[in-house]
């Protein structure tokens, strides 16, 4: 009887699949090492719940993730919430039926998404959050994000250094996105904290307007800001997606002069997307602190591959931003200088922000 049991046990172990699913303790084995997201002939199914899909940042983030996932043999579906938290929550709940292997989410609202992620947790569907951290009350496999405080802080430090060299004091109005979103609060606090540490060279004026990430609102807010505070000589723009509106307002007010002109209005922005890169090259933007959309997707793909092959994933991956000015705007590493129309052909990135543990991948 003992011999029979040993034989049966051996047969059972031989019949077990090499891959036991995401988050399992088993060891994944790709059919083709060059296609690590194909396991036992089945492509891994990834869904990206995007907060929106029209800004340059999000076009790059969603398009590059889809590009990399498909190159690795998986399938990737992009769902846009059009900045509507209730729609994103419904999209997440719908996934309880289709049950993808992984969900990547950039929350439209860091609080409203929590119940939906909790349901995905209960269904044992791994969730990776990018850029916007969900509020407490749910679990993510990992959270991937640029240090948002430093995105604001480095811009303030750069402006302070320039004003100090010129023997002047910068007086700043703030063109903000949304403070309901945690990244908005963190960026503004990062800028204001750095300004306070450089109070000899930078002063925050009492003008901080939420422009909901639109050029139209930023245009109006910029004109209103200089009407209320004609002494203003600097602007903090929370995202390059509002930069066109700011520059157009300055042009119409007769205040648009290039860097180096004594009449120049200093501008610090965040993203270094195509708008920021152009504004620096045109000479009107002093500094764009790079918020690299492609890097978020590259890291998310590495995490998905590693998790699928049962490697331990850190609970968060926070990386340092990069300061872009006229001195380095021409470097090839600038994501905002890449053609968004060819995002489906962008190659994997070379970086050390997250090193792949599954060594056979090309990432």
Image: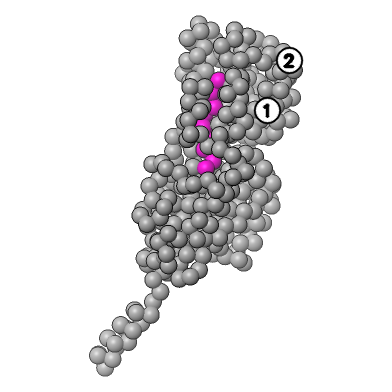
Residue 136 appears in view: no
In the rendered image, residue 262, in percent from the top left (x then y), is placed at 59, 7
In the rendered image, residue 245, in percent from the top left (x then y), is placed at 70, 27
Q: In this rendering, is residue 212 above or below 258? A: below
Picture colour scheme: one colour
Which residue is label 1 attached to? 244
Indicate the secondary structure of the residue bearing disc 1. Answer: helix
Is 289 colored magenta in this rendering? yes
In the rendered image, residue 43, in percent from the top left (x then y), is placed at 51, 65
Which residue is label 2 attached to? 253
Structural distance between the alpha carbons of marks 2 and 1 = 14 Å
What span is colored magenta in the figure? Answer: 286-294
Marked residue nearer the N-terminal end (2 or 1) = 1
Q: Which residue is at a point 50% across and 28% down the rendered structure image?
A: 330
Q: Which residue is at a point 41% across and 52% down the rendered structure image?
A: 362
Q: Which mark is residue 331?
A: none
In the rendered image, residue 266, in percent from the top left (x then y), is placed at 59, 17
Q: Which residue is at a point 60% across and 27% down the rendered structure image?
A: 278
Q: Is residue 163 left or right of residue 240?
A: left
Q: Is residue 51 left or right of residue 121?
A: right
Indicate the secondary structure of the residue bearing disc 2. Answer: loop
Is 233 colored magenta in this rendering? no
Residue 14 appears in view: yes
How many neighbours does mark 1 have within 10 angstroms: few (below 14), some (14-19), or many (20 or more)? some
Judge by depth and name the residue closer to the eye, 238 or 134: 238
The furthest residue to the left: 3
Determine which quarter of the picture holds residue 100.
bottom right
Q: Quadrant of the N terminus?
A: bottom left
Determine which quarter of the picture holds residue 270.
top right
């Amino acid at each position: 009887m003992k011999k029979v049991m040993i034989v049966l046990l051996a047969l059972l172990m031989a019949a077990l699949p090499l891959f036991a699913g995401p988050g399992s303790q088993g060891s994944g084995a790709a059919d083709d090492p060059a296609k690590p997201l194909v396991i036992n002939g089945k492509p891994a199914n990834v869904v990206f719940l995007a907060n929106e899909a029209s800004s340059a940042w999000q076009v790059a983030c969603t398009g590059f993730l889809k590009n990399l996932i498909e190159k690795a043999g998986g399938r990737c579906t992009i769902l846009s919430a059009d900045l509507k938290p209730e729609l994103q929550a419904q999209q997440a709940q719908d996934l309880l039926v289709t049950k993808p292997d992984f969900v990547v989410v950039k929350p439209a609202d860091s609080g409203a998404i929590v119940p939906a992620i909790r349901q995905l947790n209960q269904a044992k569907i791994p969730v990776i959050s990018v850029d916007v951290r969900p509020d407490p009350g749910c679990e993510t496999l990992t959270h991937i994000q640029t240090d948002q405080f430093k995105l604001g802080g480095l811009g303030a430090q750069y402006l302070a250094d320039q004003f100090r060299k010129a023997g002047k004091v910068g007086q700043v109005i703030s063109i903000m996105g949304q403070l309901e979103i945690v990244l908005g609060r963190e960026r503004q606090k990062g800028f204001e904290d750095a300004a306070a540490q450089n109070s000899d060279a930078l002063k925050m004026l009492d003008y901080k307007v939420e422009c909901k990430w639109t050029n139209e609102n930023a245009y109006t807010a910029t004109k209103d800001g200089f009407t209320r505070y004609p002494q203003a000589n600097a602007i903090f723009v929370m995202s390059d997606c509002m930069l066109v509106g700011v520059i157009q307002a300055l042009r119409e007010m007769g205040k648009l002069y290039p860097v180096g002109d004594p009449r120049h209005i200093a501008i610090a922005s965040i993203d270094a997307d195509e708008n920021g890169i152009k504004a620096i090259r045109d000479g009107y933007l002093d500094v764009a602190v790079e918020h690299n959309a492609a890097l978020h997707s590259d890291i998310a793909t590495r995490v998905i591959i590693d998790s699928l092959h049962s490697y331990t994933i850190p609970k968060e991956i926070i990386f340092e931003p990069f300061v872009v000015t006229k001195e380095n705007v021409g470097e090839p590493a600038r994501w905002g200088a890449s053609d968004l129309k060819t995002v489906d052909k962008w190659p994997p990135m070379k970086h050390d922000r997250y090193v792949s543990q599954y060594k056979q991948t090309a990432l």
